[in-house]
C-alpha cells in the first residue's frame, strides 16, 4: 500500500508541476502537449509523454500575461470573439473536470489510508504476501513503521 500511494503521490506532484510549468507566462503564444492516462491502479496520470497506448493528448495553450490595467482596457473596449470565448469555456471546463478528478483521487486515497491504518491497528497479525503464496509476518518494529506511514498518508490525503 505504501508504494502505491507513494507512486501516486509522485505522479500527482509531477502532474501539478507540469500544469504549473505551463501556467508560467511565456514571451509568445505557445501550445504544449500533456498526456492524460489511467494507470493499472486506476490513478489518473498527467505526463509530457504517453504512459500507455490509451493516453489522451491534451494541448495546453499558454500566452503571456498582461498587466491588469491593459487587460481591463481590452475587456471594456473590445468584447471577446465568440470562438475565443467558446475555447476559454472549453478550457475552463477541462480544468474543472481535472480538478474534480484530482479531488476524487484524493478522497479515494484518504479512504484507503484510513482503512489501512484501521487494519494495521485491529489485525492480530499483519503479513506481506510472498510471490509463492506464502506469508511473511511483520515483527513489532515493522508493524510500527507501517502504522507511522499510514498516519502520514492520512495526514497527506485527508487534510485540506
Image (cartoon, rainbow, N blue to C red):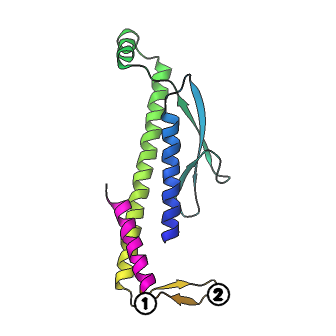
Residue found at x 59% / y 63%: 40
Taking depth in this image into account, of 91 and 109 the one nearest to the observer is 109
Residue found at x 47% / y 16%: 81
The image shows residue 56, relative to residue 77, as above or below, that is below
Residue found at x 43% / y 84%: 141
Residue 111 visible: no
Q: Pointers 2 and 1 in contact (CB under 8 A)? A: no
Q: Main structural element of the magenta stretch: helix, strand or loop?
A: helix
Q: Quadrant of residue 146?
A: bottom left
Find out whether residue 156 is within the magenta segment.
Answer: yes
Residue 96 screen position, x and y as percent: 42, 41
Q: Tell me: 24 left or right of 111.
A: right
Residue 151 visible: yes
Name of the residue lying farthest toward the front: 141
Q: Secondary structure at mark 1?
A: loop
Q: Quadrant of residue 118?
A: bottom left
Residue found at x 38% / y 74%: 148
Q: Tell me: 46 left or right of 152.
A: right
For marks 2 and 1 on the same chain, the one whose residue lies earlier in the sequence: 1
Taking depth in this image into account, of 112 and 87 the one nearest to the observer is 112
Q: Tell me: 130 left or right of 5.
A: right
The image shows residue 82, relative to residue 77, as above or below, that is below
Name of the residue lying farthest toward the right: 53
Q: CA distance from mark 2 to mark 1?
A: 19 Å
Segment colored magenta: 141-160
Residue 41 screen position, x and y as percent: 54, 64
Residue 7 screen position, x and y as percent: 53, 62
Q: Which quarter shows the C terminus?
A: bottom left
Find out whether residue 66 is within the magenta segment.
Answer: no
**Residue named by callout 2:** 132
**Residue named by callout 1:** 125
Residue 65 screen position, x and y as percent: 45, 23
Amino acid at each position: 500500500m505504501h508504494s502505491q500511494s507513494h507512486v501516486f503521490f509522485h505522479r500527482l506532484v509531477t502532474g501539478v508541476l507540469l500544469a504549473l510549468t505551463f501556467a508560467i507566462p511565456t514571451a509568445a503564444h505557445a501550445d504544449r502537449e500533456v498526456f492524460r492516462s489511467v494507470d493499472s491502479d486506476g490513478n489518473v496520470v498527467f505526463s509530457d509523454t504517453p504512459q500507455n497506448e490509451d493516453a489522451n493528448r491534451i494541448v495546453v495553450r499558454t500566452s503571456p500575461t498582461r498587466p491588469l490595467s491593459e487587460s481591463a482596457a481590452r475587456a471594456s473596449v473590445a468584447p471577446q470573439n465568440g470562438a475565443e470565448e467558446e475555447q476559454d469555456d472549453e478550457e475552463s471546463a477541462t480544468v474543472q473536470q481535472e480538478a474534480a478528478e484530482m479531488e476524487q483521487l484524493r478522497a479515494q486515497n484518504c479512504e484507503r489510508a484510513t482503512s489501512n491504518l484501521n487494519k494495521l491497528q485491529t489485525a492480530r497479525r499483519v503479513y506481506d504476501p510472498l510471490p509463492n503464496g506464502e506469508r511473511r509476518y511483520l515483527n513489532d518494529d515493522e508493524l510500527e513503521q507501517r502504522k507511522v506511514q499510514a498516519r502520514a498518508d492520512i495526514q497527506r490525503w485527508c487534510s485540506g
